[in-house]
Image: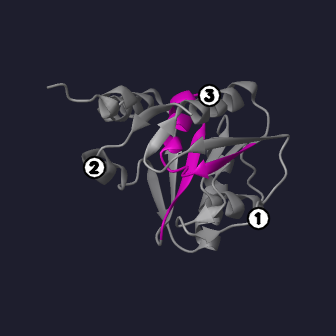
């Protein structure tokens, strides 16, 4: 496993803020609004990141082309796997990082446009950034905002630029592993 990016404490604070449009409300309310957005916006793809939001989308007949989950909700409650997909990929991605294998799995799933289910051993939250980076324009990436609702990120050149800035601000592995020489 190769860690490509590690979140910094400063960036972690920034990433707590919604990265797209926050839709507040109950599961039913947020899914109803999501369905309206899909019908009006006709996104090129739908990508969901997170167990609860992915499950709710499926239950409300909104079917993401790519789901990225870790079989947990709020990092500690086991969630059973939810749907069958054309392809299921398992990747390791420790909390607060983005691994090379997770990055490649997302990139391949988006480019191949096959209904893919990525199951993460670790944490999937930061993988939202990779999904936005590689998704085609006019795609939407949806993730949960705990205790509040969902966040819908419409993929635009501006959002991709913002992701690149976030990734640049993260510490690459080699900076974390440098040993001081005396």
Q: Which of pointers 3 and 1 indicates the residue nearer the eye?
A: 3
Disc ID at residue 104: 3
The Cα–Cα distance between marks 3 and 2, rounded to whole angstroms, is 25 Å
* First along the sequence among labels 3 and 1: 1
Q: How far apart are marks 1 and 2 (CA)?
A: 35 Å
Give the crowd class for mark 1: few <14, some 14-19, many >=20 residues within 10 Å. few
Q: Where is residue 141 in the image (x, y as percent from the top left)?
A: 57, 44
Circle 2 crowding by C-alpha within 10 Å: few under 14, some 14–19, many from 20: few
Identify the element where label 2 is drawn. helix
Q: Does the magenta stretch include residue 8?
A: no
Residue sitting at x 56%, y 51%:
122
At x 83%, y 46%, the residue is: 85
Q: Position of residue 44 (x, y in %)?
A: 67, 34
- Write down the quadrant of residue 112 in the picture: top right
Q: Who comes first in sequence, dot 1 or dot 2?
A: 2
Answer whether labels 3 and 1 touch (C-beta < 8 Å): no
- Foreground: 138 or 66? 66
Q: Residue furthest front?
A: 182
Closer to viewer: mark 1 or mark 2: 2
> Residue 162, position in %: x, y?
37, 33
Residue located beneath label 1 in the image: 59
Q: What element carries label 3?
A: helix
Q: Magenta segment, which residues?
A: 117-146
Mark linked to residue 9: 2
Q: Disc 3 versus disc 1: distance between alpha carbons? A: 28 Å
Q: Does the magenta stretch include residue 120?
A: yes
Residue 125: image location, x then y, percent: 50, 50
């Amino acid at each position: 496993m190769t860690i490509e990016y590690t979140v910094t404490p400063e960036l972690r604070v920034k990433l707590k803020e919604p990265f797209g449009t926050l839709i507040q409300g109950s599961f039913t309310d947020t899914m109803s609004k999501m369905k309206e957005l899909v019908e009006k916006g006709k996104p090129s793809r739908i990508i969901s990141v997170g167990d609860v939001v992915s499950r709710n989308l499926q239950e409300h007949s909104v079917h993401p082309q790519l789901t990225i989950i870790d079989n947990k909700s709020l990092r500690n409650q086991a969630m059973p796997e939810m749907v069958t997909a054309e392809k299921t990929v398992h990747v390791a991605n420790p909390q607060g990082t983005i691994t090379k294998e997770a990055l490649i799995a997302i990139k391949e799933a988006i480019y191949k446009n096959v209904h893919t289910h990525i199951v993460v051993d670790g944490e999937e939250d930061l993988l939202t950034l990779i999904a936005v980076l590689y998704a085609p324009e006019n795609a939407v990436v949806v993730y949960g905002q705990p205790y509040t609702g969902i966040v819908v990120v419409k993929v635009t050149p501006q959002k991709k630029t913002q992701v690149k800035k976030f990734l640049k601000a993260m510490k690459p592995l080699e900076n974390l592993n440098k040993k001081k020489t005396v």
